[in-house]
Image (cartoon, grey):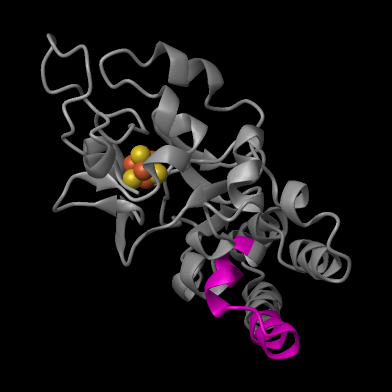
Amino acid sequence: MNHSETKKKAPASRLIPEPRSAFINQCQRCGTCCQKGGPALHKEDAPLIEQGAILTKNLFTLRKGEMAVDNVRGYAAPLEAEIIKIKGQGRSWACCFYDPIAHTCGIYDARPVECRVLACWNTADIERMYAKDRLKRQDLLGTISGLWEVVQAHEQRCAYRDIEKLAARLKEGAHADARAELNEMVAYDRHLRSLTVEKSGIDPAMLDFLFGRPLSETLPGYSFLQPPPVRPL
Ligand code: SF4
């Protein structure tokens, strides 16, 4: 049920949008926050997934070490810890639950905590909590024997800290070796994804949650020396 049906006020915001006016002190339903990207999830959002209000196919993981834009600090940097976020709409960052025509949230009654907390006219509350108690894949998958081990194996073989080291070797001129290792890593990432779908029968849309975005997307042409930034918040 969306909030136009319930006559509740606007979809809660996320991110840190510019207030359109210094005089705004309540949500104007402009949708700017929802269009800038889905929220990062926190531990208190876990029941929304466990109870099926948000499906794992609606999520993706930004893995530790992956480059991302920190909207609060205002710069791109490798992530110190993984972040689980709600997906965008196709190639747009707009939250997949946002309806741009009706300006409504498709999960308003079950929206994540960041959406409930953010007020674009006063960002103090979101700034206080945005980096605390973030949800991790282990919180949701740690007890699923078999699947969790596969996720861990992928993390070990495709860690961004290792990619960073390979990037440094490339810079130093060790091109052949470093590129061969990167090729192997990208091939493993691709193979594990298709194998997981084949063996477990899971919806392929879940893969970006389980393993993060494919390396073939985050390292296009291995241009990871200047990786495409993403928004963690
Ligand atoms: S979950 Fe709802 S309120 Fe939150 S960003 Fe998405 S559309 Fe907006």
Identify the residue at image location x=52%, y=26%. 130
Residue 196 inside the magenta-drawn segment = yes
Where is residue 165, by image quadrant? bottom right
Q: Vertical placement of 177 versus 130: above or below?
A: below
Q: Vertical placement of 41 versus 129: above or below?
A: below
- In the rendered image, the residue lying farthest to the front is 6
The quadrant of the rendered image in which ligand 1 is seen is: top left
Q: Is residue 163 left or right of residue 1?
A: right
Q: Is residue 125 left or right of residue 202?
A: left
From the top left corner, tell me how far across and down residue 177 is, in percent: 71, 77
Where is residue 87, by image quadrant? bottom left
Can the viewer see residue 35? Answer: no
Q: Which residues are magenta?
A: 191-209
Number of numbered callouts drawn:
0
From the top left corner, tell me how far across and down residue 37 is, in percent: 35, 46
Q: Vertical placement of 130 versus 24: above or below?
A: below
Q: Is 199 in front, or is 162?
A: 199
Identify the residue at image location x=19%, y=45%. 103
- In the rendered image, the residue lying farthest to the bottom is 198
From the top left corner, tell me how far across and down residue 233 is, in percent: 45, 37
Identify the residue at image location x=65%, y=43%. 46
Q: Is 218 in front, or is 37?
A: 37
From the top left corner, tell me how far across and down residue 50 is, in percent: 66, 51
Prevailing secondary structure of the magenta residues:
helix
Where is residue 188, by image quadrant? bottom right
Residue 178 inside the magenta-drawn segment = no
Can the viewer see residue 211? Answer: yes
Q: Is residue 227 left or right of residue 41?
A: left
Identify the residue at image location x=52%, y=15%. 128
Q: Vertical placement of 162 versus 68: above or below?
A: below
